[in-house]
Amino acid sequence: MPIAHADGIPTRYEVIGSGPPLLMFSPGGFDAHRENWRTLGIYRRLRLLDHLSERYTCIVFDRREAGESGGRLERLGWDRYAAQGAGLLDHLGIERAHLMGGCAGCSTVAAFAVARPERTLSMVLFSPAGGVKYRMKQHDRFDRHLAYVDEHGLEGVLALVKNSDQGFSKDPRVGPWAPALRNDAAFADEYARQDPGRYRILVKGIARLLYDRDTVPGAEPEDLLRLDVPALIVPGEDDSHAPSAARYLQECLPRAEYWDVPVAEQTESTAPAQVLRFLDRA
């Protein structure tokens, strides 16, 4: 698989199919790698990538600090995730694209569209992550990582990372930079040299910036209300993908189309066709 330097981050990506460009921000939270479109939960069942790539050029990639992409020690925010996607489009010579996000990828799509509406043809927001329990779960994850740092130090985190294949979503102890630490020895050395007190401030700041509300994070509602971009919203219905999160996006986006279908009725025969109908009209 090729690697692009997107926003200065080594980014593993794949281009599948032909037709208008569709930049796809992977589901999976902190483990948002490109294969999740094929293997993770509902996305495996719906085979969205297989169907969409028949009519669109699907661009899938490992989010920074996930999969085989690199990382950087900085205060992570939705704007930084969006900048990686924009950098990948730059690398591919694509000025405008349709955007699709799954799960937490929806937050990045919203942030991208607010910052770069001139580059956004449309948005597909599939099972957006959000809700009270989602916010609580994310803050707990960061707290558990910092508790491990307090007990074992950053060298202990690094040792744990190197003896595990788990990411932050499945094992909070390893922290949000785990895949990048495995992929890049120089980055791992830099990580281990961090002052623990300053590191704690950084991690606390990331948790507060990323998960600052009990609905869909990523863009301010006032900015979404002014966004003149067509959007398709497909709801989820569990603790991390609350139906209220999808309804919030419907309320905020002036050109939103809401597919009011429960998850049990989102099937391979219905969901890809719905997304394709929307993209073809957008």
Image: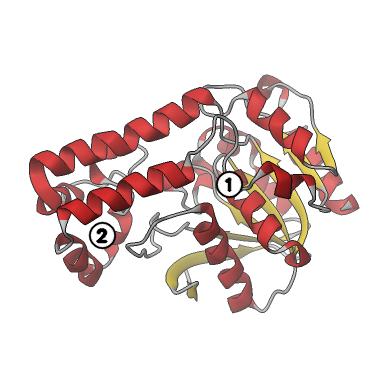
- Mark 2 sits on what residue? 181
Q: Is residue 148 above or below residue 21?
A: above
Furthest-right residue in view? 281
Marked residue nearer the N-terminal end (2 or 1): 2
In the image shown, does 1 or 139 lie closer to the viewer?
A: 139
- Amino acid of disc 2: Leu
**Residue 263 pos. (x, y %):** 66, 24
Left or right of residue 159, residue 243 in this image: right
Colour convention of the picture: secondary structure
Left or right of residue 87, residue 74 in this image: left
Residue at 22% in and 72% down: 186
**Residue 101 pos. (x, y %):** 63, 47
In the image shown, does 123 or 20 lie closer to the viewer?
A: 123
Which label lies toward us, 2 or 1? 1
Q: Residues within 10 Å of mark 1 (few under 14, many from 20)?
A: many
Residue at 22% in and 40% down: 146
Judged from the image, the secondary structure of the residue bearing numbered disc 1 is: loop
In the image shown, does 194 or 231 lie closer to the viewer?
A: 194
- Amino acid of disc 1: Gly
Q: Is residue 257 above or below residue 12?
A: above
Q: Is residue 243 above or below residue 82?
A: above
Residue 144 visible from this viewpoint: yes
- Mark 1 sits on what residue? 218
Q: Residues within 10 Å of mark 2 (few under 14, many from 20)?
A: many
Check if mark 2's residue and mark 1's residue have beta carbons within 8 Å.
no
Q: Quadrant of residue 251?
A: top right
**Residue 242 pos. (x, y %):** 60, 25
Judged from the image, the secondary structure of the residue bearing numbered disc 2 is: helix
